[in-house]
Image (tube, rainbow, N blue to C red):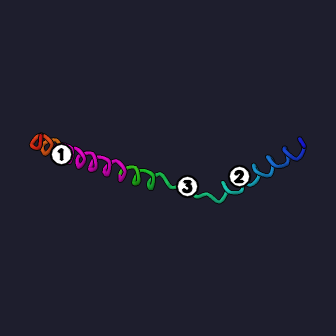
Amino acid sequence: MLKRWIATISTFLDEVKGELRKTSYPSRKETLGSTGVVLIFTVIMSIFLSLVDALLVRIIAIVI
């Protein structure tokens, strides 16, 4: 039973190693570009949500 368990783990780790060889990682330039897009999108969305929140607060204040 222990030998089978060790063989299963060994097979799994061999398959993981094989999959990692197939993986392509982004270059430094691609990583920095993607990070810039995410940061810009985050700033735009935070401004948008702040404006929507302020508008909803005013609407609720008028209704109440």
Q: Secondary structure at mark 2?
A: helix
Q: Which residues are magenta?
A: 37-56
Residue 38 is left or right of residue 58, and the answer is right
When the figure is inspected, residue 50 is found, relative to residue 22, above or below; the finding is above
> How far apart are the alpha carbons under marks 2 and 1?
50 Å
Residue 47 lies in the magenta-colored region: yes
Residue corresponding to mark 3: 25
| Horizontal arrangement in the rendering, residue 29 relative to residue 6 (left or right) | left
Residue 29, picture quadrant: bottom left
Which residue extends farthest front? 64
Name the amino acid type tagged 3: Tyr
Q: Looking at the image, is mark 3 or mark 1 earlier in the sequence?
A: 3
Q: 45 or 26, which lies in front?
A: 45
User: Main SS type for the magenta part?
Assistant: helix
Task: Please state the horizontal and vertical placement of residue 14, each as a whole percent of the image.
Answer: 77, 52
**Does the magenta-highlighted stretch encompass residue 63?**
no
Residue 13 screen position, x and y as percent: 75, 49
Please provide percent x and percent y for residue 37. 35, 53
Label 2 belongs to which residue? 16
Depth order, front residue of 1/16: 1
Residue 56: numbered disc? 1
